[in-house]
């Protein structure tokens, strides 16, 4: 995140990803940008993928300057397989390999199912679920070659019936399922696939869109988080470094929930 240093080199060795290449959809902002920064600080180069070329270009520059690794922007809408393929070709032309893939591009807004149009539901499924499928398909030949690793950014919304989140709940349940299949089918090729399910992460576009604006509701929501605070992007970044590292080499087909224990709370707010 701009203005927030995401540095886990005091926890993990700083060179563990040297020579590796990360391909991250949604890497131009928010949680995925922080995930990218953390992996770059450990020596990996990166390609960040998104729709907004100005935001991507600025982010790539800032990430390169901040980490000393190289970050390259590749414009693509994850709903468009041809654009994703071109982004992968750009990554290979620049760096010759892809070791890590973060499927993070997502769309969300609050809407009751009674007011959710067919197109609104479809749009989120297309970004989150089909976008993940397209990203897996485009990158898999290269990830097989490098015996690499996937992280899919999901959510905890679909563990219960979260109001106003029918579209994202359905989309992320499918993302979890896709990750499990990749873990099983691609495991024999040396490929791992896991999910990170963030809880309420402050300071992101998702938080702007989803967190309650009413102070009393917000305080109630905070009080219900066992960890006593909202998450921040560093929490997700540290989980990312662990899951991509050799410390997690026997971990595949898992969902790592990073939510301060919130998903166990009976009535979140
Ligand atoms: C109801 C809405 C809506 C809203 C859009 N739509 N916003 N319906 N309430 N607030 C409807 C539109 O009316 C339209 O349906 C359909 O959705 C498509 O909208 P478009 O604007 O044409 O789509 P597009 O330009 O492709 O934008 C996609 C988007 C947008 C998802 C709607 O919000 C977006 O680009 N978001 C990307 C960034 C983002 O959302 N980041 C936060 C991710 S947070 P009709 O019927 O009118 O045609 C996240 C965290 C999850 O994922 C877990 C949290 C814990």
Image (cartoon, grey):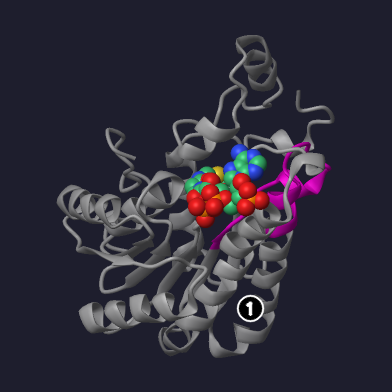
* Residue 16 vertical placement versus 62 (above, below): below
Asked whether the viewer can see residue 196, the reply is yes
Residue 154 appears left or right of 79:
right
Where does the magenta region start and end? 152-171
The residue sitting at 55% across, 89% down in the picture is 189
- Residue 192: image location, x then y, percent: 56, 75
Which image quadrant: the C terminus? top right
The picture places residue 29, in percent across and down from the top left corner, at 38, 47
Q: Secondary structure at mark 1?
A: helix
- Answer with left or right where residue 212 lies relative to residue 4: right
Q: Nearer the viewer, residue 260 or 173?
A: 173
The percent coordinates of residue 28 (x first, y second) are 35, 52
**Does the segment drawn in magenta span residue 68?**
no
Question: 173 left or right of 26?
Answer: right
User: Which residue is tagged 1?
Assistant: 182
Say whether residue 147 is left or right of residue 48.
right
- Res. 106 visible in picture: no
Q: Residue at x 61, y 89 (%)?
A: 188
Residue 101 drawn above or below residue 255: below
Q: Is 162 inside the magenta-drawn segment?
A: yes
Quarter of the picture holding the N terminus = top left
Percent position (x, y) of residue 146?
41, 84
């Amino acid at each position: 995140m701009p203005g927030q240093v995401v540095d886990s080199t005091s926890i993990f060795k700083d060179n563990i990803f040297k020579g590796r290449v990360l391909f991250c959809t949604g890497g131009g902002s928010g949680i995925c940008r922080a995930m990218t920064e953390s992996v770059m600080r450990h020596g990996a180069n990166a390609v960040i993928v998104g729709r907004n070329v100005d935001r991507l270009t600025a982010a790539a520059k800032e990430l390169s300057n901040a980490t000393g690794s190289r970050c390259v922007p590749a414009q693509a809408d994850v709903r468009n397989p041809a654009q994703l393929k071109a982004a992968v070709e750009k990554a290979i032309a620049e760096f010759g390999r892809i070791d890590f893939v973060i499927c993070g591009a997502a769309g969300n807004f609050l809407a009751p199912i009674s007011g959710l149009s067919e197109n609104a539901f479809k749009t989120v499924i297309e970004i989150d679920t089909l976008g993940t499928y397209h990203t897996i398909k485009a990158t898999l030949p290269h990830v097989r070659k490098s015996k690499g690793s996937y992280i899919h950014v999901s959510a905890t919304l679909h563990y219960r019936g979260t109001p106003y989140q029918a579209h994202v709940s359905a989309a992320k349940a499918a993302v979890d399922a896709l990750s499990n299949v990749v873990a099983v089918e691609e495991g024999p090729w040396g490929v791992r696939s896991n999910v990170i399910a963030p809880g309420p992460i402050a300071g992101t576009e998702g938080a702007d869109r989803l967190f309650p604006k009413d102070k009393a509701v917000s305080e109630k929501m905070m009080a219900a988080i066992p960890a006593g605070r909202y998450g921040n992007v560093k929490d997700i970044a540290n989980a990312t470094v662990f899951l991509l590292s050799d410390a997690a080499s026997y971990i595949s087909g898992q969902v790592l929930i990073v939510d301060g224990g919130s998903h166990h709370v009976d009535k979140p707010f």
